[in-house]
Image (tube, coloured by chain):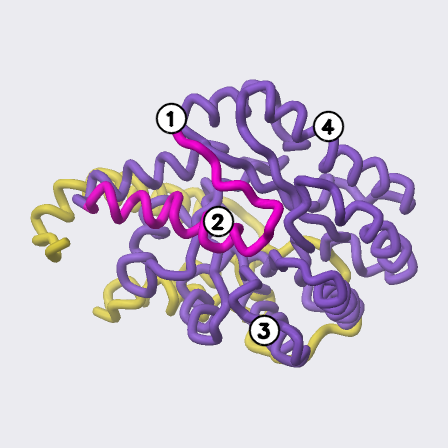
Chain colours: A purple, B yellow
Amino acid sequence: MVSRTTDDYKAMALAGCAAICEPAFWAGFDRKSADGFYDYFCQLTQHEPARAQKNGIPHYSWLCINPKESEDMGLAREVMALIPEFLNAPNVLGIGEIGLNKNTKNELKILEAHIDLAVKHNQLILVHTPHLEDKRKGTRLILDALKNNPKIEPHRVIIDHVEEHTFREVIDQGFWAGITLYPESKASPQRAIDMVETISAQRVWLNSACDWGHSDPLSVPKTALEMKRRGHSVQAIDNLIFGNPIQFLSQSKKFIRPEVI
Amino acid sequence: MSSPTRKEVADLHFMDARAKLLDLAAFLDRVDRSSGSDDHRIRGLRLALKVLNEGNKNRVAEILNQWSDPTAEPLDKSDTKAATGVWPQL
């Protein structure tokens, strides 16, 4: 996790984390050239897996130019041209996290280009939906873009960062949904489990944001604890926290079902 | 899993909700003590407060929808990368 310390890997290992999925995302600043992304993709495919392995955690990644940096379409296309070289890396599961940030026309064009790239290389897709007041509109634009590509199979796409006003729309259209746990800006453990209880426990996974900003790498086990406090069975907790991500990720031949201690 | 009773829900989550409500009250007091012009985020927050007591069982979705950009067309360009939490034109 490029934005976290080695101590976070250790804490996640101690909390029972069986595997890490790290999407390509914003670095907290805009990179000035495609060379910067080349180095970043090396980091995601070589250096971070090695860091994670020191704590016994398998590390997987997703590649793209994230929507926050895709407004510059010239740079975005240069970066996208680099991606095929990395798709054969053993830890790359697909294209992501693609999507929209401020729902602009340029962002949408680059999203469509990423969808084409994923289809061409038969990759799974991980989608970032916009933040806060931009989420509902962006989610709808993203769903339309995916549905406009006849080769997209919804069960091979996960739409991340759903909240109460977008979750049902994603699930109803056959896609997977991701509930991202953040201390402030997305879902809390309590809200996440409310959504699972009232909307769907199928085709959904939970993920801890391991971001530059205020975030908590242990929020998935904390959410498992919230389920336990509410009286959910061990089986129900295991299905949501472990079984569902295994089911989605196993659609990539590179994903190896992790052993759990 | 059977549906919990109200007492069970309160036993589990009341103190957390109580603390968050008091924090919100303190925030609004702080806002009222401050000077300057209106802020769309605080306007959005005050609008959302009305939803809390209306008995709708989907309060979170309703509030999130209230704060969302209601338009459908992609923007030509954006002046900023960041969202603020409430649609500025609300």
Of residues B86 and A140, which is closer to you in this image?
Answer: A140
**How far across and how far down the image is residue B25, in percent?**
33, 46
Mark 2: which secondary structure?
A: strand
**Dot 3, how many residues are within 10 Å of its Cα: few (below 14), some (14-19), or many (20+)?**
some
Mark 4: which secondary structure?
A: helix
Which label is found at residue A14? none
- Tell me the residue that label 3 is attached to: A143
- Tell me the residue that label 4 is attached to: A47
Q: Residue at x 40, y 63 (%)?
A: A164
- Tell me the residue that label 1 is attached to: A261
Q: Is residue B4 visible?
A: yes
Mark 1 or 4, closer to the camera: 1
Q: Amino acid at mark 3?
A: Leu
Residue at mark 4 shares a chain with residue at mark 3: yes
Residue at mark 3 shares a chain with residue at mark 1: yes
Q: Of callouts 1 and 4, which one flags the residue occurring earlier in the amino acid sequence?
A: 4
Q: Is residue B90 left or right of residue A169?
A: right
**Circles 1, 4 touching at the beta carbon (< 8 Å):** no
Q: Amino acid at mark 4?
A: His
- Mark 4 belongs to chain: A
Measure the alpha-carbon separation of dots 1 and 4: 25 Å
| Quadrant of the snapshot with the C terminus of chain A | top left
The residue stretch that appears in magenta? A232-261
Mark 4 or 3, closer to the camera: 4
Asked if the stretch drawn in magenta spans residue A67, the answer is: no
- Tell me the residue that label 2 is attached to: A180
Q: Of callouts 2 and 4, which one flags the residue occurring earlier in the amino acid sequence?
A: 4
